[in-house]
């Protein structure tokens, strides 16, 4: 049992699962990797990982029948969910990658980078800083100054509502690197690969959100 209830990592066949579980274990949290629909519905907290293609990810989620269960847990039961990298993008309404609808938990689009390739490489890969837009969010409690995180992505999130943007990152354009709406949180970077800054984000999600 986790410190504060059941933590479910949603297994839909696309994700950096082992590194997330290892980081949670290091922080003192048990987690369960599963695509069992009843466990997802009854979870205390959900983590939606993801690496790869947006359309393929949504096809996997829908083929497993998980979309309704995720929405039930998050919307009806008001359970916190953390989307990581592709998992964060899946929280949004639609993606240009595969011209595909997402979970629609936060209003917004996932767009392809259109940058000067001689200046900005795609994918956006490596360490980068975030600019916190909502410092009163519990996600940022006790976060050290100038936090930086490890990014790997070729598409970026663009929320429809400014109030859903918790942090931004400059990479040719301003990308929404942390998004949130109530119990729903998404991070474009990999907190499980971002050392002390990532540990703080994960801890705050599990304890404060």
Image (tube, rainbow, N blue to C red):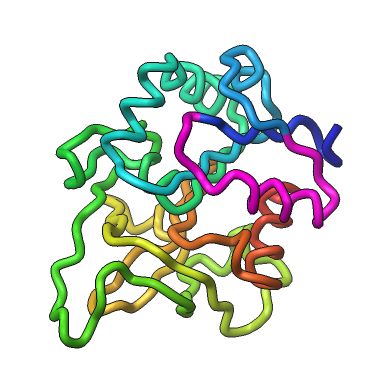
Residue sitting at x 40%, y 53%: 164
x, y (%) of residue 12?
48, 29
| 147 or 79, nearer to the observer | 147
140 in the magenta segment: no
Residue sitting at x 81%, y 45%: 29
Check the image and report above or below for 12 versus 17.
above
Residue sitting at x 39%, y 56%: 163
x, y (%) of residue 11?
55, 30
The reply, left or right, for residue 61 in relation to residue 16 is left
Check the image and report above or below for 3 versus 69.
below
x, y (%) of residue 64?
44, 17
Looking at the image, how many numbered discs can be counted on the residues?
Answer: 0
Check the image and report above or below for 107 versus 173.
above
Region in magenta: 12-31
Which quadrant: the N terminus?
Answer: top right
25 in the magenta segment: yes
Check the image and report above or below for 90 versus 28.
above
| 176 or 49, nearer to the observer | 49
Residue sitting at x 70%, y 30%: 44
Asked which quadrant contains residue 91, the reply is top left
Asked which quadrant contains residue 138, the reply is bottom right
x, y (%) of residue 20?
64, 50
| 196 or 146, nearer to the observer | 196
The reply, left or right, for residue 19 in relation to residue 49 is right
The reply, left or right, for residue 207 in relation to residue 48 is right
């Amino acid at each position: 049992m986790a410190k504060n209830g059941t933590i479910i990592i949603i297994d839909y066949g696309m994700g950096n699962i082992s590194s997330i579980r290892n980081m949670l274990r290091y922080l003192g949290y048990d987690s369960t990797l599963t695509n069992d629909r009843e466990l997802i519905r009854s979870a205390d907290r959900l983590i939606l990982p993801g690496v790869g293609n947006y359309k393929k990810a949504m096809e996997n989620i829908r083929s497993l029948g998980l979309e309704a269960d995720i929405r039930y847990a998050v919307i009806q039961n008001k359970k916190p969910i953390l989307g990581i990298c592709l998992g964060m993008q899946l929280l949004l309404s639609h993606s240009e990658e595969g011209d595909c609808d997402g979970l629609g938990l936060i209003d917004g689009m996932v767009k392809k980078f259109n940058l000067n390739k001689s200046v900005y490489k795609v994918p956006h890969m490596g360490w980068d800083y975030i600019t916190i837009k909502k410092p009163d969010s519990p996600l940022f409690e006790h976060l050290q100054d100038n936090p930086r995180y490890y990014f790997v992505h070729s598409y970026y999130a663009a929320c429809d509502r400014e109030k859903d943007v918790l942090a931004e990152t400059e990479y040719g354009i301003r990308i929404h690197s942390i998004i949130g709406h109530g119990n729903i949180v998404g991070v474009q970077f990999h907190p499980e690969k971002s050392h002390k800054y990532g540990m703080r984000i994960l801890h705050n999600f599990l304890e404060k959100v």
